[in-house]
Amino acid sequence: MFGFKKKNITENEQVVLEENDSAELNSSVEETNTETETPNANETAPEADAAPVIEESGDSDLVDTNEEVKKKGFFAKLKQGLTKTRDNIKNRIDVAFDESRQIDDEFYEDLEEALVMADVGIDATEGIIERLQQKVKERHIYDARECKKLLLDSIKEQMSLEKDAYDFENTQSVVLVIGVNGVGKTTTVGKLAHNLKDNGRKVMIVAADTFRAAATEQLEEWAKRADVDIISAQEGADPSGVVFDAVQSAKKKNIDTLICDTAGRLHNKKNLMEELKKMNRIIDREFPNAKRENFIVLDGTTGQNALIQAREFANVADLTGIIITKLDGTAKGGIVVAIQSELKIPVKYIGVGEGIEDLQRFDANAFVDALFE
Ligand SMILES: Nc1nc2c(ncn2[C@@H]2O[C@H](COP(=O)(O)OP(=O)(O)OP(=O)(O)O)[C@@H](O)[C@H]2O)c(=O)[nH]1
Ligand SMILES: [Mg+2]
């Protein structure tokens, strides 16, 4: 059912290939350096140097305004992306929190229904409602609108990320992007590369999905769009060998973040999970000082299936974060809350469109406001 055309080749190679041999696998690896055509991230840094000039000229308001515009743009895109989910639950939420509403059993039932409709999931919804009931009781709240604020604050609190969630963006790091077929891994690698590069980081991406030539071509296209270096290999090459080469090249070029795109795989395909472990071992061994992130990409439109995938991958891989894509294409964006609340693995980014600008850091406050307000 999954298009692993070169599966046999890889399986055989994997048996033959000892980790120490991986240096010999480099012959087919290709490197495309986009830096020769355009200035690299460090060379574009003058923007940062320009900041004092703006201050000197007394234009600090301009900086504030730009930040404001950026923030507004971010929120507008998020809100636009979550339109289907918001429309799906809006009526129920409005009815539940109508100012004339009594806070009684029926109120909680309506609320529960709205959350389940948005795919927040039964377990997470029950937890949310229980906590809300407790707070309402403790604080003697009788006003439904006050209750809404309490609910949103409680979800925001539950979804908020640790302070160090994005540390990898500012230090030397290697990010492995994994997940089942078609969830948006390659697209996400391209978007993430763009975001980091935009923040002045030196980024390299690696096409460790060697099963299909088209997969490499797709990533090469993203490398061009994001204007970052890419390491790729011929179809059928050992993915771990490509990763090995990419790590050497990243070290040599003093790359800040190396992002690895991998082939779609099911958690129960033993050989493919072994391959993933091997990539991990190679990165750990060859780049021990790099901060590591293993992100699982989940397709938000698959609802509860995404939750199942995350749970199963978490059993076999050391996941450090979740990326949920295609939230613009679903009426069930509440799945983000369900996944985070059940797995306790942070949702770090969300995809709200197919464009290069459409990957956002997960901001619990903005997300909950965009969904419920
Ligand atoms: N609407 C929307 N589409 C997305 C988003 N992210 C990815 N896609 C689309 O999803 C489809 C699959 O994306 P890919 O990046 O190729 O997925 P993949 O996980 O790399 O797929 P395989 O390599 O085949 O496993 C493409 O058509 C993307 O444009 C998103 O946030 N929103
Ligand atoms: Mg792909």
Image (cartoon, grey):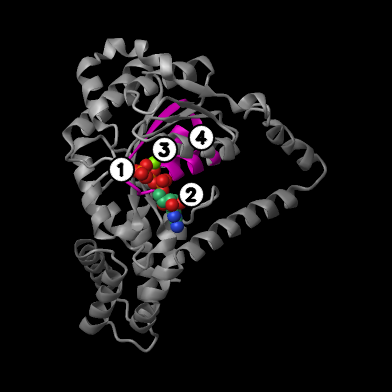
Please state the horizontal and vertical placement of residue 304, each as a whole percent of the image. 24, 59
Residue on which disc 1 sits: 179
User: Going by the image, does 52 lie left or right of 111?
Assistant: right
Which numbered tag is attached to residue 215? 3
Residue on which disc 4 sits: 220
Sequence-earlier tag: 3 or 2:
3
Residue on which disc 2 sits: 359
Disc 3 residue: CB within 8 Å of ligand 2? yes
Disc 2 residue: CB within 8 Å of ligand 1? yes
Please state the horizontal and vertical placement of residue 373, each as a whole percent of the image. 45, 71
Q: In the figure, 66 relative to 263: above or below?
A: below
- The residue lying furthest to the right in this view is 57
Q: Nearer the viewer, residue 26 or 351?
A: 26
Residue kind at label 3, given as amino acid type: Ala
Residue drawn where x is 74% and y is 36% of the image: 50
Residue drawn where x is 38% and y is 63% of the image: 153
Residue drawn where x is 64% and y is 56% of the image: 68
Q: Do the residues labelled 2 and 1 touch (CB within 8 Å)?
A: no
Residue kind at label 2, given as amino acid type: Leu
Magenta residues, start to end: 167-194
Q: Label 2: how many residues lie within 10 Å, few (<14), some (14-19) or many (20+)?
A: many
Magenta stretch: includes residue 193: yes
Q: Which of 164 and 195 is in front in this view?
A: 195
User: Going by the image, does 325 lie left or right of 134?
Assistant: right
Q: Which of the 4 image quadrants contains residue 259?
A: top left
User: Going by the image, does 249 lie left or right of 119?
Assistant: right
Sequence-earlier tag: 4 or 3:
3
Per the image, label 2 sits on a secondary structure element best described as strand
Residue kind at label 4, given as amino acid type: Glu
Please state the horizontal and vertical placement of residue 122, each as a whole percent of the image. 20, 65
Q: Label 1: how many residues lie within 10 Å, few (<14), some (14-19) or many (20+)?
A: many
Per the image, label 4 sits on a secondary structure element best described as helix
